[in-house]
Amino acid sequence: MATAAPTPVRRRTWRSLPVVHQLRQSVGLQRGMLVAGLTITGVFVLTAVFAPLLAPYGYGQLRDADGTFGAQQSPSAEHWLGTTVGGYDVLSRVLYGTRTALFVIVVAILLSIVAGVLLGLVSGYLGGWLDRVLVVVADAVYAFPSLLLAIVAAIVISGGQSSLVGGVLAAAISITVVFIPQYFRVVRAETVRIKSEAFVESARVVGTSTWRIMTRHVLRNATRSLPLIVTLNASEAILTLAGLGFLGFGIQPTAAAEWGFDLNRSISDVTSGIWWTSIFPGSAIVLTVLGLTLVGESLNDLADPRLRARRRAADAPPPADVAVTPGGGLAAGTEGVLP
């Protein structure tokens, strides 16, 4: 006897994925923004993963079998985007720069989530003097300009040395210092609200340990909004990394490729009419930040039920018994025909 195909179950499982679910909820311009953001972000991630295959040269390569590349060479068949003042291939450095950016984003956000969520959970649930101290420290850190705080952290961590570990890892950790207060404040506020709920009180009554309540009941409900913050913080991490590199706290070209550092070295080229050394790293920063921002803003709108209701109401067709009057209003009780 033939069995029924499990297509409906598989379809429901596929549609319940976070991004797919949000995409199905979106309508109109909001869906276009989300699709555009996901496309740009997907291209960014794929480029970072396959950069060694896509790049014609290494990020620190200065010569090939025919000799040295030459400094500030205009775009040609050998170098599609030209060469930099240091003699590096611009296309290769732009492609490899995606790997540096992705590495910094992943490390910074993972460290921020672990530290911020743990501190926010403990502070919001236990309260007392520990909560007051952590709130004061988080507010003090959050009051500083993010780039200035990242510069100070980079100097303390790496001593201003631009190496692979001292540059990439220091940039990621310095960005982590900026992001921790954001996750801390969000998780703490949700924890304070959730710990007074009935299911938490019931867990206390039956003798459940504090650690189990925090990890099993409170944590799961207090971190539902974190994916929205992650997408927005990813774009901020790109800008902070580029700012560090532009101000001289970036990474040496022999250690890794970084867009902000390349922009710093191309400042003098702009006044000489050499545009290709700056426009392509700058465009990479703008496009990456744009894609991540579009995804974050779209998810933020979809998380607000009021905005979803407004968009559905705006896109819904008028009822059949409502007609538009010559003055632009709606006339009820008609058959939808203009007079």
Image (tube, rainbow, N blue to C red):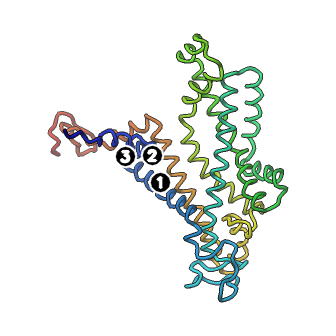
How far from the left and from the top, in percent, is residue 173? Answer: 73, 49
At x 54% / y 29%, what residue is drawn? 221
Q: Earlier in the sequence, mark 3 or mark 1?
A: 3
Q: For residue 27, which numbered disc appears in the image?
A: 3
Element on which disc 1 rests: helix
Placement of the C terminus among the 4 image quadrants: top left
**Residue 314 or 36: which is nearer the viewer?**
36
Say which amino acid is labelled 2: Val
Say which amino acid is labelled 3: Val
**Residue 219 or 295: which is nearer the viewer?**
219
How far from the left and from the top, in percent, is residue 104? Answer: 66, 54
- The answer to whether residue 321 is left or right of residue 307 is left
Element on which disc 3 rests: loop
**Mark 2 lies on residue:** 19
Compared with 59, 306 (above or below) is: above
Placement of the N terminus among the 4 image quadrants: top left
**Mark 1 lies on residue:** 38
- The answer to whether residue 282 is left or right of residue 298 is right
Element on which disc 2 rests: helix
